[in-house]
Image (tube, rainbow, N blue to C red):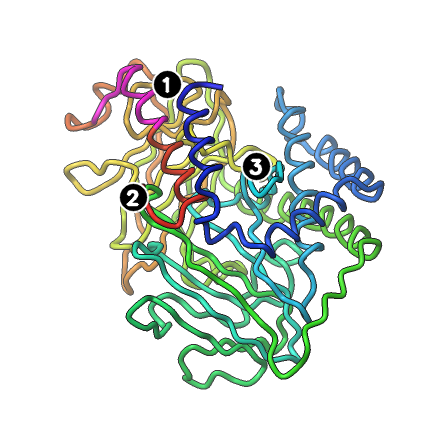
C-alpha cells in the first residue's frame, strides 16, 4: 500500500465515528450480510451468476474472467445486504451499492450493481405499506448537490429499474435552520403535502445523495422509525439466505438483459445516442441519461464532448461489461461537472483511453480498452435542446494535442499522481467523515 493510501486509510479509521453512514444499524446489517454471504445458498448463487455471464456474448471479448468473478461476488454481497435489512417492522437505512470498506471492526466487500453512479451514496429501507413511519434527517453544512427519497414497489433490479411510486427531492423538503427535517411516510395520498412520502404499493425506500464535490459535500443523516406499533426485529437467517440467493440472480439477469444489452449496446460501438428522460425507461424521475459502449484499439482514444444543458449536475462514468463501475476511489473512472474542466465554449470534453493520454479530463478505465459509458444530468431546465448534447469521436492519442481545444489542461506523471491522491483523500472524507478536514 502506498504512503498516500496508508495515510488515508488511517485517517478514515480514526474518524469513522463522525460518519453518518457508520450507524449501529449499518454494522448490524453488515454483520448479518457477511453471515449470509458465507452460506451455501450464496455460493450456489455466485456460481449461477458466473455461469450466466460466461454464457453471454461479452464473455468472448477477452480478459473478462476476473471482471465476471468480481461482478458475481458483488451482486451476491448486495443481495445479502438487502436481505439482511428487510425488517420493515424494525426499519433502518442500509448503505449498499458501495465500494469495499473497512470500519466498525468489519472488513466489508464491495456491493456494486447496475452501473452504479460513483457520485451517489445509495441507502435503502424496507417498509410495510400498512404501517406508518417517521423519517428523520439532517443535511450537513455542505449538503449534496442533489438528494432524493423515493418509494419503490421492489428493489432496484428486482424486475424494475426503479419505477418510482413517490418521490421527495431536496427542493421539496422543509428544513429548519440546522438542516433538520422530518417526513411522514405512510400509504395516504400526498395531495400536495410537503414532507410526506406515500408508500401505497411500495416496499422499499431509496435515499440517494449525489455528491459532486467529494472533498466537502456530505451525505445527509437519515433514520426511520415505526410509529403506532411496537418495533419487531424479525430477521431470520434461513429465510434471508434463500431470499438473498434468489435476489442476486434476479438483479444480475435483469441488468444484463435490460440495461447492458437493452440500453448500453443498442447503438453501434463507440457511439452515444442523445439523452432521454430516465423516467421513461423506469428510472429516476429527476434524471436524464444516455448510455453506450466502446472498444478501442491500441493507441486510440475516445473523445466525448458534452453540453451541460444548464443542469444542476452532470456525471460521466465508465463501467465494465458486467454492470460494475471501475474502481473510482483513486482512478478517475468517473468525472462530474465539479471534477472535470469545461472548455471556453462551455462544453466538457473527456478522453477515454486504456493508457494515460496526459489530459486532465481523462476517464480512466483501469487499463481496460472496452466497457460501457453512462452520462447523467440532474435538473435540466425545461425546453433544453438535446440535439448534439453528446458527440463522440475516436481519435489517435498522438493527435489529441491538435484535436482538443487550445485551453485543454495537460498533466504530467507527477500532476496525475497528485490528482489521484487528492481524489482518494476526498473519497475517504465523503465516506468516513461528516465534516471536512
Measured in 3D between alpha carbons, the distance from the residue under mark 2 to the one under mark 3, in whole angstroms, is: 25 Å
Residue 393 among magenta residues? no
Nearer to me, 132 or 409:
132
Specify the quadrant of the image occupied by residue 236. Answer: bottom right
Q: Which residue is mark 1?
A: 356
Find residue 392 and report its horizontal and vertical position in percent: 35, 34
Q: Residue at x 37, y 49 (%)?
A: 211
Q: Which residues are drawn in magenta? A: 409-421
Disc 2 is placed on an element classified as loop
User: How would you classify the magenta stretch by its main secondary structure?
Assistant: helix
Q: Which residue is mark 2?
A: 337
Nearer to me, 209 or 371:
209
Comes first in the chain, label 2 or label 1: 2
- Residue 386 versus residue 370 in the image, above or below: below
Q: Residue at x 53, y 75 (%)?
A: 134
Q: Which residue is mark 3?
A: 100
Amino acid at each position: 500500500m502506498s504512503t498516500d493510501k496508508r495515510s488515508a486509510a488511517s485517517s478514515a479509521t480514526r474518524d469513522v465515528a463522525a460518519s453518518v453512514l457508520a450507524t449501529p444499524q449499518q454494522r448490524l446489517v453488515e454483520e448479518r450480510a457477511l453471515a449470509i454471504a458465507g452460506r451455501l445458498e450464496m455460493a450456489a448463487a455466485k456460481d449461477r451468476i458466473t455461469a450466466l455471464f460466461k454464457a453471454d456474448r461479452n464473455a468472448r471479448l477477452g480478459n473478462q474472467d476476473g471482471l465476471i468473478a468480481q461482478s458475481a461476488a458483488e451482486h451476491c454481497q448486495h443481495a445479502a445486504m438487502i436481505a439482511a435489512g428487510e425488517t420493515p417492522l424494525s426499519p433502518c437505512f442500509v448503505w449498499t451499492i458501495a465500494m469495499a470498506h473497512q470500519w466498525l471492526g468489519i472488513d466489508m466487500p464491495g456491493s456494486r450493481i447496475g452501473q452504479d453512479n460513483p457520485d451517489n451514496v445509495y441507502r435503502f429501507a424496507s417498509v410495510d405499506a400498512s404501517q406508518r413511519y417517521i423519517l428523520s434527517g439532517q443535511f450537513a453544512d455542505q449538503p449534496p448537490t442533489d438528494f432524493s427519497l423515493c418509494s419503490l414497489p421492489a428493489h432496484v433490479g428486482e424486475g424494475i429499474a426503479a419505477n418510482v411510486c413517490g418521490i421527495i427531492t431536496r427542493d421539496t423538503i422543509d428544513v429548519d435552520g440546522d438542516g433538520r427535517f422530518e417526513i411522514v411516510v405512510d400509504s395516504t395520498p400526498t395531495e400536495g403535502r410537503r414532507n410526506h412520502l406515500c408508500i401505497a404499493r411500495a416496499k422499499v425506500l431509496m435515499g440517494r445523495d449525489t455528491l459532486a464535490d467529494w472533498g466537502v459535500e456530505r451525505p445527509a443523516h437519515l433514520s426511520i422509525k415505526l410509529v403506532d406499533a411496537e418495533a419487531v426485529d424479525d430477521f431470520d437467517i434461513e429465510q434471508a439466505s434463500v431470499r438473498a440467493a434468489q435476489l442476486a440472480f434476479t438483479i444480475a439477469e435483469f441488468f444484463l438483459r435490460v440495461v447492458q444489452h437493452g440500453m448500453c449496446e443498442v447503438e453501434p460501438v463507440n457511439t452515444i445516442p442523445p439523452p432521454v428522460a430516465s423516467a421513461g425507461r423506469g428510472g429516476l424521475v429527476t434524471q436524464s441519461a444516455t448510455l453506450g459502449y466502446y472498444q478501442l484499439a491500441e493507441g486510440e482514444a475516445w473523445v466525448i464532448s458534452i453540453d451541460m444543458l444548464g443542469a444542476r449536475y452532470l456525471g460521466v462514468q465508465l463501467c465494465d461489461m458486467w454492470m460494475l463501475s471501475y474502481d473510482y476511489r483513486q482512478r478517475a473512472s468517473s468525472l462530474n461537472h465539479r471534477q472535470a474542466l469545461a472548455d471556453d465554449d462551455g462544453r466538457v470534453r473527456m478522453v477515454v483511453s486504456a493508457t494515460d493520454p496526459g489530459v486532465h479530463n481523462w476517464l480512466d478505465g483501469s487499463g481496460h480498452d472496452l466497457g460501457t459509458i453512462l452520462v447523467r444530468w440532474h435538473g435540466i431546465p425545461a425546453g433544453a435542446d438535446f440535439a448534439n448534447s453528446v458527440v463522440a469521436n475516436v481519435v489517435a492519442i498522438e493527435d489529441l494535442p491538435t484535436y482538443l481545444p487550445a485551453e485543454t489542461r495537460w498533466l504530467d506523471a507527477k500532476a496525475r499522481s497528485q490528482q489521484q491522491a487528492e481524489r482518494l483523500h476526498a473519497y475517504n472524507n465523503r465516506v468516513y467523515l461528516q465534516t471536512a478536514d
